[in-house]
Amino acid sequence: MYSNKYTYSKKEKLCSRKDISRLFEHGKAFYSEPFRLLWLKSEDILPFPALTGISVGKKSFPKAVDRNRVKRLIREAWRVNKQHLYGLLEQINIQIVIMIIYSGDEIPEFSTLNERMQEAIRKFSLHLNTIKENK
């Protein structure tokens, strides 16, 4: 279905306004410091196990250069660590749309952000496992 390479292509990004609005209206929230993950099982067939969007609040980072820096760091942390989640999603045979919202108020270092992303994906995977067991 997808390549196992550590990439983050355009096809993996959440761009559809319809999907984004559906996600914010009907999605489930999951919090793992400093991220808030909104996710929803996809009704459409996707080219990847997950479509991902990344958001950083304007209130926390008034300067666009700071917001863009944090988004770049989050995208890189996601690109490096998403394989574990993708494997689980393929194993339980679901596809999701997910929005990663950064809720911190200072620009993090990549190493810290990478550790937090690993932790968030691990916790989210455990959350998905409980959903799989309830089916």
Image (spheres, rainbow, N blue to C red):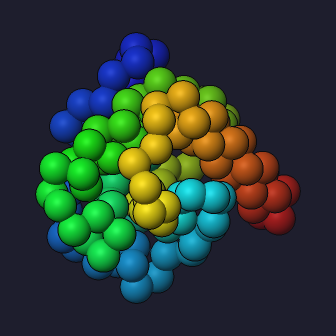
Tell me which corner region of the image, top left, top right, bottom left or bottom right, holds residue 61.
bottom left
The residue shown at (48%, 61%) is 104
User: Which quarter of the rendering shows the C terminus?
Assistant: bottom right
Instruction: Count every numbered label the image shows and give the total.
Output: 0
User: Which quarter of the rendering shows the N terminus?
Assistant: top left
Q: As drawn, which residue projects farthest toward the bottom?
A: 25
Q: As drawn, which residue projects farthest toward the left?
A: 64
The residue shown at (39%, 24%) is 2
Residue 35 picture location, percent across and down = 54, 58
Q: Observer-nearest residue: 99 or 62?
A: 62
Going by the image, does 94 lie left or right of 19? right
Residue 71 picture location, percent across and down = 30, 47
Going by the image, does 66 lie left or right of 28? left
Q: Is residue 90 above or below residue 71?
A: above
The residue shown at (58%, 72%) is 29
Residue 95 picture location, percent across and down = 49, 50
Q: Is residue 104 above or below residue 117?
A: below
Residue 77 picture location, percent across and down = 46, 33
Q: As drawn, which residue projects farthest toward the top?
A: 5
Residue 40 can be seen in this image: no
Tell me which corner region of the image, top left, top right, bottom left or bottom right, holds residue 56.
bottom left
Residue 130 can be seen in this image: yes
Q: Observer-nearest residue: 79 or 48?
A: 79
Q: Observer-nearest residue: 27 or 117?
A: 117
